[in-house]
Every structure is written in structure tokens, then in C-alpha cells.
Image (cartoon, helix red, strand yellow):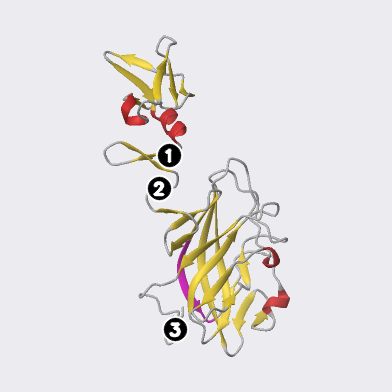
Amino acid sequence: MKILLFCTLALGALTPAHAQLKASNERTLTINETIASERLQRVGDSVMVPIADVAKALGLSIVKTKTGYALIKDGGANQVEGIRGKLGETVFDGKWRLTVTNPREVASYTLETKTATDYGLINPIAKINGTTYEPKPGYRLLVYRCEVKNGQKSAQQLWWFQNDTHTALTDASGESFPPILTDIASEAFQSKPLLPGAKLEFNLIFCVPSSANPRELVFTLRTIADKGSDVRISLADPTLNLNRGGKKRL
């Protein structure tokens, strides 16, 4: 059953001098000369308007809190607007939301899915045994857990073909290292269609020189038709031992 939530209409609290009741038996609210709601209700001396209508008109999202509800910017309190963030934060580029967590160094990595691979990129730096990958001497494997959400109004497919993206680890010395594997079920470097709000979780695997000192993870959020944008995730975390001089293996 769908529940309709109402809030008391306080015109000054919305957009001063720009929000008003439209003369229509007090059923319609306009904000900046655009109809925001046609579902007003008068209760005594107060005028009530659905929270969802107000949120939509102001470009906000409704979040359930301990004491009721809150209207916040799309994505929530833990979301970083723009294209920069850090581990554990959700970065939103206006179309996609990306969260990177659980960085770790591993002695080997076994694929969890049947995914598209670029053997020309892998063979020089990693050994392949079936679906298991091991770094060659002088290299090490770093794994990052990623979650991507479709923030658009239609189904979209994430595209990660290396020639069309800038996804990479950037080193303190200015070097960059593209991932050798993006562990998403695919045969053509493209995810299954993601409905609006749907999420995709996967591992991103890098094989970097033993001396590499990763500072940022750059990730290109795009579809095959849309060039998208690059987001940067800071890897500066003193609790991690993935940098040169100290290794954490699982």
C-alpha cells in the first residue's frame, strides 16, 4: 500500500517570494512559476502538501530519519558532489554513483565471473592459470571493491573498455597503471543493463610494480555511447599498508 506523506506548507521556508498557492480552490502549489503540486489539502488553518512533491520540485531526496523524514541533496549525507572523494565515500558525477572500499594486496586472484579480458595487457606482467592470476616477479596484485549505481532515469550499461577509459591507479611519482581485470560478468566490456537506482558490485584488479606507491584511483564512469566523466578516489589512508615499504596480503 502506498503511503502519502504530507508536510505543512510554509511558503517562506521553501523559496521566499517565489512559492505561492494558485487560485484553484487552494489545490495547487507553484514554485518559481512552475507547478510543484496539485494535491494540497487544507487542515484547519494549515495547508498540507505531499513531501514527495516538494522534494521533486526542489531537486531533493526524502530520507527516513530517527525522528521522521529529511529532505537532502540526492545521494545522502555520505555522498560527495563532484568528481573527487576518498575510500568509503560515494562520489556522484550527475549520472553515476561510485563507492570504492576494501583495498587489499593479494598473492593471486581468481575471477568470480566470466568477464571480458585484455590478454595483451595482462601477459607481460601477470601469469594466468585458468581463471587465476598471479603477478610476475617485480609486480604485485592490488584489489579494490567497487559499487556503481545508476543515477539516471533510464537503464544504462557501464562500459569499461580500456582504450575508451582512463581508469587507473596513479602513483606518487606520476605514473599510472590501468587495471588488468574488471571482474564483471561480460563478454564485451559492458555490464548488463542497470535500471534506475540499481547497483553493480565488482572487484577492480591492478598489477603494479613492487615499488609503486598508489595515491589515487581514477575511474571513468560512462556508457558505450556517452564519454562520461572521470572521478578520483584518494587512497591516502594511514591504516593501509598497500604502499611501498609495507605490504598487506590476504
Stretch of the chain drawn in magenta: 100-107
| Residue extending farthest front | 17
The residue to which callout 2 is attached is 76
- Of callouts 2 and 1, which one flags the residue occurring earlier in the amino acid sequence? 1
Q: What secondary structure is found at the residue carrying circle 2? A: loop
Mark 2 and mark 1 residues within 8 Å of each other at the beta carbon: yes
Question: Which of the image's four quarters has the N terminus?
Answer: top left
Q: Residue shown at 59%/76% (left/top)?
A: 177
Looking at the image, which residue is at 39% across and 53% down? 78
Of mark 3 and mark 2, the one earlier in the sequence is 2
What amino acid is found at the position of numbered circle 3 in the picture? Lys
Identity of the amino acid at label 1? Answer: Ser
User: Residue 30, how many percent across, how many down?
Assistant: 44, 22
Task: Indicate whether residue 82 is drawn in magenta.
Answer: no
Please tell me the numbered disc located at residue 184: none
Structural distance between the alpha carbons of marks 3 and 1? 41 Å
**Contact check, label 3 and label 2, Cβ < 8 Å:** no
- At label 2, the amino acid type is Gly
Of badges 3 and 2, nearer the viewer stands 2
User: Residue drawn 57% across and 75% down?
Assistant: 206
- Residue in the foreground of this view, choosing between 248 and 158: 158
Q: Is residue 157 above or below residue 112?
A: above
Q: Quadrant of residue 46?
A: top left
Report how far apart the C-alphas of labels 3 and 2 lie in the structure.
34 Å
Looking at the image, is 5 positioned above or below residue 143? above
CA–CA distance between discs 2 and 1? 8 Å
Q: Is residue 24 above or below residue 117?
A: above
Which labelled disc corresponds to residue 61? 1
Q: Which residue is mark 3?
A: 247
